[in-house]
Image (cartoon, rainbow, N blue to C red):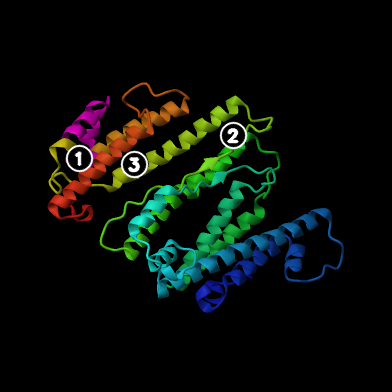
Amino acid sequence: MSVTAPTLGLVDGYSRWELLAHLLKEVVARHEPDAARVLNGETLERQPASATLCRILQAQSIMFQLLTIAEQNRDMRNRRELERQQGRAAVKGTFAAALDSVKGAGASGERVLELLGSIRIVPVMTAHPTEAKRVTVLECHRRIYRRLFELESPRWTPREQDELIGSLRDEIELLWLTGELKLEKPSVRDEVAWGLYFFSENLFDVVPALLAKVTADLQRAFPGRNWDVPLFVRFGSWIGGDRDGHPYVTSEVTREALWANRLTCLRRYQGRVAGLLRHLSVAEHSLPLSEAFEATLGERLASLPDGATLAARNAGEPFRQYLAAVLARLTGTVEACEQRRAVDSLAAYGSADELLVDVDIMRSALAERRTDTGASVGDAG
């Protein structure tokens, strides 16, 4: 029998673990009753067949996976509650706590910034031969965690909460029906794709968020100035480049791994610029531009075959015109990378430095105009 939200909702006292365990037992009972009995602590009357035994082991494995997800959710909820009540510095291991400690010892903000500029944190990705869990399963785990997080909100009506629990049940059923392990040994190319998945889904967002937290913590601990935090976190990877006796990592495989890494980064930039283009709807009459930026915008549009079309499509919105030009060059760069060829025209970026120059020009133009007018971009229009 399906249990509805008013009975199982987190707001009614059920723990995350109890909710997940109940939903798993409900799912397993529909597909494999003997496995559900074992999950409930019952003893089977007869020795199960090999296929049933495998399903019992799978059910127990998923139960432990869900327990881990529930514990992670609980720990993050406790951490957020502590920060909400006592401040970020009360959370052990945060930069805020460390900065309060060093400030109490007499260190200055300048000294902290100097030290941050001198360190390098370099997590290195590697493919381990015992890693057999599929990305599909990891994505399912992530969605289950997100559903639990959404259920914490008190704003849901009973109907909406019931729908959320229904979607959580669906994710658990999908996990039950999905093959958990890779049936074939992954190739090096598969391992490269596996490693890049974590960049696309998590790491590209984590580093900017980390730097933003460090900046906010510095401003709180040492107020009175704007802090420009250096990039002290970088990433490395052995995947596709480990030539230490790996028989399948050839020069060609390493070359393909480098192209794949480059393409992943370029597509990320492409998506971010496209999103910014949709968002940054600043009208030219709302935020007067400097002559230097107008000249640069004209040069960027003139360098593209369809520059006039891009300008007309975003008439009266110079920053969108500028971003459209940047996006066009990025798209040309992505196409060159997909074809494994070098950039050979001004319609694409030849290096990351060229892209950074364009980004800095626009950022400087926005900052300059905000300073001159006393308004923020959010006030424009």
Amino acid residing under circle 1: Pro
The span from disc 1 to disc 3 (Cα, nearest Å) is 15 Å
- Per the image, the residue denoted by label 3 is 273
User: Left or right: where does residue 54 sit relative to residue 109?
Assistant: right
- Per the image, the residue denoted by label 1 is 318
The span from disc 1 to disc 2 (Cα, nearest Å) is 43 Å
Residue appearing at x 80%, y 57% in the figure: 53
Is 295 colored magenta in this rendering? yes
Is 287 colored magenta in this rendering? no
Residue appearing at x 17%, y 46% in the figure: 283
Q: Which mark is on residue 240?
A: 2
Q: Is residue 72 among the parts visible in the rendering?
A: yes
Q: Secondary structure at mark 1?
A: helix
Which comes before the other along the chain, label 1 or label 3? Answer: 3
User: Left or right: where does residue 18 sit relative to residue 217?
Assistant: right
Amino acid residing under circle 2: Gly
Residue appearing at x 50%, y 45% in the figure: 199
Give the percent coordinates (x, y) of residue 275: 34, 45
